[in-house]
Amino acid sequence: MAKAKLFKAASPLLVLALVLALTLVPVASPQAVSAATGQQGVTGTVNSSNVAPSITAVALKNATYVAASAMTPQITFALNMTISDNNTLDDISTINIAIYHDTSAGSNGTRPSTWTSSSWDADNCTIFKWTKTGGWAMVNGSAVTTWTLNGTINSDTPSNLTLTEGTWSLAFKPGKLAMEAGGGDTDEWCFCVNVTDAAGATAEDISEVANSMAAYLEIATTVAAISFGNITPGGTAAIQTPDSHILGTNVTSNDAYELKGNSTSPWTSDGYNMSLSGGNTTPTGTRQFALTVDNAADGDGHPTTAQAVNTTLSQITGLGSVAAPTTGVTDSEGTSDTSLYMDIMLGNDIHIGTYTGTIYLQAINA
């Protein structure tokens, strides 16, 4: 009986604990929740202005595209210009190039005021142009010149104009009269590259990538042969053919030069010889002749101041420093021309015959 009483006493406590536990659990009540939203878009704009092209590199190469540090007339060179444009290379419309001689100290001188043939001057300034529609051209107008576009290699344009950077290449040969320059501060050749885009924005670079120009010279005579005509031994004669009495020289040079002359010896005729005496009077030696020369003459073509011609090259008096031919703006190229007059004097013992020899004329940069 005691065991049963203990069980009954515990039951009310257990039930109470369960009831209390249940009363601690909250009970949620239903509420309304809204899912509605709102949104509005606006358009944003910004204008990006045109940026001028830029010239990032200029370099002179020879015909095998090796860097060149000096120029020589009539030899092919390539001026490479690396150009960039934010709007792609297709935006480039014009490239102007001036190659010009400068004598101003401490600067690269003044580039041409225009990019037309009115600035062309073969011995001092040449102009080349590239256009998107026409490609490469030399801007010499009607002037006859030995400057040339292209050469043993050709000028070039970037193959892909959709890129933002590329290299144009101007192939050219300097003209025969392009002034000789040692490359010093007051005697140099400069390159000016001027680039224009479709909007008219420009970039310009002036450099001395190769500022010296080598000397150039060539000489030609106005006639292939001269004749002193018929002379009695012991006599003297001026040039008879041509009847102007003139042996002329035409010199093409980009620097001052001296003119020299000499003659072969002996002159021969069917096995007979006569030797050059080297004097300027009638020779007295055995079977000798004398030649004289001057750049001035009397009315019959006899040299005014007779200078003896001998077998070694000797400077002709008064022609020790002849100015190089020059050109003005828009002029064609020319030559420096000299008229020479000669006498021949025969010794008294010259055998009858037609004697032939060779007279040489040489021009050397002074």
Image (spheres, helix red, strand yellow):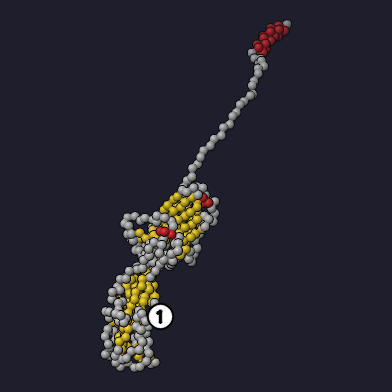
Task: From this view, report whether residue 180 is shown above or below residue 289.
Answer: above
Q: Outermost residue toward the front? A: 299
Q: Quadrant of residue 365?
A: bottom left
Task: From this view, report whether residue 37 is shown above or below residue 127.
Answer: above
Residue at position x 39%, y 77% in the image: 222
Quadrant for the C terminus in the image = bottom left
Q: Residue type at mark 1: give it.
A: Ala
Residue at position x 62%, y 25% in the image: 37
Q: Residues within 10 Å of mark 1 (few under 14, many from 20)?
A: few
Q: Decide if residue 280 is in sight here.
A: yes
For mark 1, what is the residue?
224
**Picture coordinates of residue 76, whole percent (x, y):** 45, 65
Q: Quadrant of residue 342?
A: bottom left
Q: Nearer the viewer, residue 183 or 8?
A: 183
**Picture coordinates of residue 181, whole percent (x, y):** 35, 63
Q: Is residue 205 left or right of residue 302?
A: right
Q: Decide if residue 62 is in sight here.
A: no
Residue at position x 67%, y 13% in the image: 22
Q: Nearer the viewer, residue 183 or 272?
A: 272
